[in-house]
Amino acid sequence: MTKPLVYALLGVAAWAGTAAADNFRCPNGSIVSTGDSQSMVAMKCDPPTYKATRMESEAGHRGATILINVEEWTYNEGPNRLVHILTFRNGVLMSVQTAGFGR
């Protein structure tokens, strides 16, 4: 193989192996990332427009059921901005999703 091809393949392999964290820029300008605690996000960001809480169950060790607290915070900043949904599982930010433009 030629050297440029080897370097290109190494670059692609390095890029593919990096873990991407979801980030969210709060309405006040602060940035939070997946892995941040719920209390850290609450300190950095303004209160969300809407909060929803539910319990989910997962199979645990030896058939035991584990209950997980899932909380979704919705930030709706108006018709010219995207709505963002932050999902926390047991108090840790697990994902940031967009849901179209706000109202």
Image: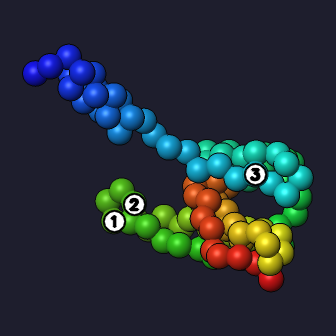
| Whether label 3 touches label 1, CB < 8 Å | no
Q: Quadrant of residue 7?
A: top left
The amino acid type, in three-letter code, at marker 1 is: Gly
Q: Is residue 80 left or right of residue 58?
A: right
The amino acid type, in three-letter code, at marker 3 is: Arg
Where is mark 3, residue-wise? 25
The local crowd at label 2, few if under 14, some if 14 to 19, many if 20 or more residues have their Cα within 10 Å, is few
Residue drawn at x 72%, y 46% is: 32
Residue 39, image x, y percentages: 79, 50
Residue that lies at the very extreme toward the left in this rendered image: 1
Instruction: Give the number of the mark in front: 3 or 1.
Output: 3
Of the 4 image quadrants, the one containing the C terminus is: bottom right
Structural distance between the alpha carbons of marks 2 and 1: 6 Å
Residue 40, image x, y percentages: 78, 46
Q: Secondary structure at mark 3?
A: strand
Where is mark 1, residue-wise? 63
Q: Secondary structure at mark 2?
A: loop
Residue drawn at x 84%, y 53% is: 45
| Whether label 2 touches label 1, CB < 8 Å | yes
Residue 29, image x, y percentages: 85, 48
Disc on res. 12:
none
Where is mark 2, residue-wise? 60
The amino acid type, in three-letter code, at marker 2 is: Gly
Q: Quadrant of residue 3?
A: top left
Res 40 visible: yes
The local crowd at label 3, few if under 14, some if 14 to 19, many if 20 or more residues have their Cα within 10 Å, is few
Q: Nearer the viewer, residue 78 or 58?
A: 78
Of the 4 image quadrants, the one containing the N terminus is: top left
Q: Earlier in the sequence, mark 3 or mark 1?
A: 3
Q: Nearer the viewer, residue 83 or 58?
A: 83
The local crowd at label 1, few if under 14, some if 14 to 19, many if 20 or more residues have their Cα within 10 Å, is few
